[in-house]
Amino acid sequence: MEFKNLLWQLDENILFITINRPDKLNALNGDTLVEIKEAFLTAKNITTLKGIIITGAGEKAFVAGADIAEFQGLDANQAKALAQRGHDIFFLIEQMPIPVIAVVNGFALGGGCELSMACHLRIATSNAKFGQPEVNLGIIAGYGGTQRLIQYIGKAKALELHLTADMIDAQTALNLGLLNYIENDKSAAIDKAKSIINKIATKGPIAIAKVIACTNAFYTDGVDGFATEVNAFSDIFSSSDVLEGVSAFLEKRKPAFTGK
Ligand code: COA
């Protein structure tokens, strides 16, 4: 697919989405957000896809935030629409039925940190820096950052990061629970992400989608996560994958899941 601010590359059934505005440190302007939405909606319909890796062009930044230039002259209603659009797109990413991994190379600030947190896993390069610096501008996170940072690192540290606007390095982010792995450079981080996606692709695809949905249910207001799990468990038993998985174990062979 062709985009203005994204690169879309399919390689061995893994989709690479690269945010491609390196001269603006890949800041998320409106056009880029709309393209991200289009990319994920398209990806959702590609049945052969094993997973998605999202990263930023260049070595300096994953995404240095929402595009600050677009905040000029916004009124309250426009700001609400902007935040809502971001929320909808980041929920779309979080609810993808296949693994989405952020490869965080350099700055992941504001909307960049928020984008990485909407992904299922985060692998950073050793030079990555995370932060929610919005209060420096007299604003707050608007793409889910006040909620998702707590989910990963707890209230004390999440409040500290939002209130002080401090940046943390990759090692601190790993220690706090924000990251899954740190790799030396982008190419090693991409290799790690690919190997995780390829490993997940050997499992039952229905089960993988249900794990993601049940995990999201824990964090969804008004949704009983335990009830979601019971229903998901029972849904799986109406698929042929469950027969294949169990038979393969008993016959001491590798399962050949079909996702049906
Ligand atoms: N929105 C719009 N443009 C941005 C941006 C953002 N969030 N972050 C960086 N840019 C632009 C800069 O304006 C600059 O553009 P220019 O060359 O046309 O002047 C370019 O990207 C390079 O950034 P620069 O600030 O010169 O790089 P730096 O290495 O000196 O600093 C940062 C890097 C990340 C510390 C700094 O760019 C920054 O603080 N960015 C804003 C982070 C932020 O507040 N994010 C949350 C937004 S809600």
Image (cartoon, grey):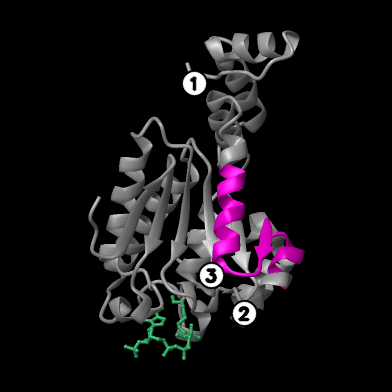
**In this picture, is 87 found above or below 244?**
below
> Which dot, 2 or 3, sits closer to the camera?
3
Mark 2 lies within 8 Å of ligand 1 (Cβ measured): yes
Frontmost residue, 111 versus 63: 63
Q: Main secondary structure of the magenta part?
A: helix
Where is residue 72, by image quadrant? Answer: bottom left
Return the residue at label 1.
259
Neighbor class of circle 3 (other Cα within 10 Å; few <14, some 14-19, many 20+) is many
Numbered-mark total: 3
Which amino acid, mark 3? Asn
Return the residue at label 2.
167
Label 2: element kind: loop
153 left or right of 142 in image: right
Return the residue at label 3.
105
Frontmost residue, 54 versus 184: 184
Looking at the picture, how far across and down is residue 112, in whole percent?
Answer: 48, 67
Q: Is residue 20 magenta-colored?
A: no
> For the magenta stretch, what is the residue range?
172-197
Looking at the picture, how far across and down is residue 115, in whole percent?
Answer: 48, 60
Task: Please report the residue visible at 36 percent of the width from the left and 52 percent of the height from the top.
Answer: 9
Marks 3 and 1 sit apart, C-alpha to C-alpha, by 33 Å
Task: Please report the residue visible at 54 percent of the width from the left and 10 percent of the height from the top.
Answer: 240
**In this picture, is 216 found above or below 17?**
above
Where is residue 5, by image quadrant? Answer: bottom left
Task: Please report the residue visible at 42 percent of the width from the left and 36 percent of the height from the top.
Answer: 49
